[in-house]
Image (cartoon, grey):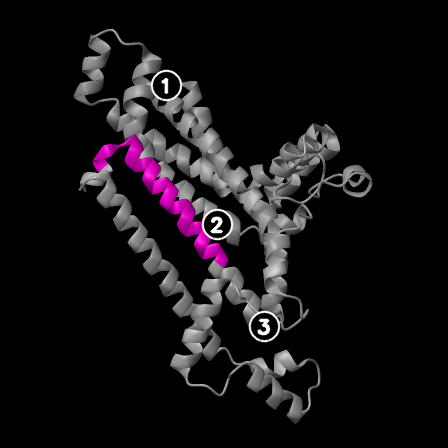
Amino acid sequence: MGLGRYIFRRFILSAFVVVGVTFLVFVAAQVVPSDPAALYAGPRPSAEQIEKARAELHLEASLPERFIRFGKAMATGDFGVSYKSRRLISQDLAAFLPATLELAAFSTFLALLIGIPAGAFAAARRGGWLDRMGGLASIAAVAMPAFFLAMLLQFVFAKWLGVLPLSGRMSREIAISAPLAPVTGFALIDALLSRRFDAFGDALAHLILPALTLAAYPAGIAMRLTRSAMIEILERRHILAARALGLSGRRILFGHALPNAVGPALTVLGLSFAFALTGAVLVEIIFAWPGLGRYVSEAILSKDFPVIAAATLVVTLCYVAMNLVLDLAQALIDPRVTLK
């Protein structure tokens, strides 16, 4: 299978995933024991208000018609209004989603930056003190609960050393006196576009602790997977031949062995991106991060189905896009992937 055919196949499979998730979200809405019309009509609605809400929501239509209408709305980004706040869901997503995406992307980058090189060095020093310390660190990163790690990082770096902020996304001095002009919704990118390097440093400082908290688990997994794959690859004949030819250890490690071992770690990091998007609720609460997690958790408690459906679809699209990028990166790094 060539690279072009592989890319086309991955796009088709990604489209099927999005359609399947849309169908499952619609089915879940039909079996939830609640009346959307009563929720939409507000607190203590009358029978007339419920009937009016039922007509506005087209609840009297058949299931196929409602699914087609639901699918068209999701495809066009017309997510409707929240039952609880009566605000446009698209406006809420535009406000909350960039913060979560920025946190998830940065934590995935940290996991990639820490886990894969650490696994490669541990395999190259197999049995040494670096390998043993790396093994202990990876086990601790995987086993430690996120909330405990978050509070530990806050105590060490915010309270004890005082080098990083405790919580929030921006400091009050910048947020109130000289706020950033919202262009993309990503604080780091908006600061660079505005040439506000003070705001960039402040946003980066606020991002480090929550991103490290989310990156710990996938970095530990990526390190163990990379180490196991590297140990096997370093014993293969072409690596032994490269050593016999006198190639440097760094070139053998990163130029010949690591590209063949990085595939499983990239797959795990793709899953960790989805975990960061959907599982960052507790981390966002601890660090007072104004992201999607708290918004969706409040919608779940209030059974605000349009918000849940919109957030589910948006997170699915983000995960599918991230997974597609990682699949293509894996195919470019290791061309054998396209031949399977």
Question: Which segment did they paint magenta?
Answer: 314-336
Which secondary structure, mark 1?
loop
User: Marks 2 and 3, Cα distance to the nearest angstrom?
Assistant: 22 Å
- Determine crowd level at label 2: few under 14, some 14-19, many 20+ residues with C-alpha closer than 10 A: some
Who's the residue at 79% across and 38% down the image? 178
**Which numbered dot is residue 153?**
none
User: Marks 3 and 1, Cα distance to the nearest angstrom?
Assistant: 53 Å
The answer to whether residue 123 is visible is yes
| Residue 159 in the image: above or below residue 82 | above
Q: Nearer the viewer, residue 61 or 116?
A: 61
- Determine crowd level at label 3: few under 14, some 14-19, many 20+ residues with C-alpha closer than 10 A: many
20 horizontally vs 29: left or right: left
Q: Nearer the viewer, residue 137 or 9?
A: 9
| Residue 288 in the image: above or below residue 16 | above
**In terms of sequence position, does the residue under pointer 1 or pointer 2 come before the other?**
1
The residue tagged 1 is 125
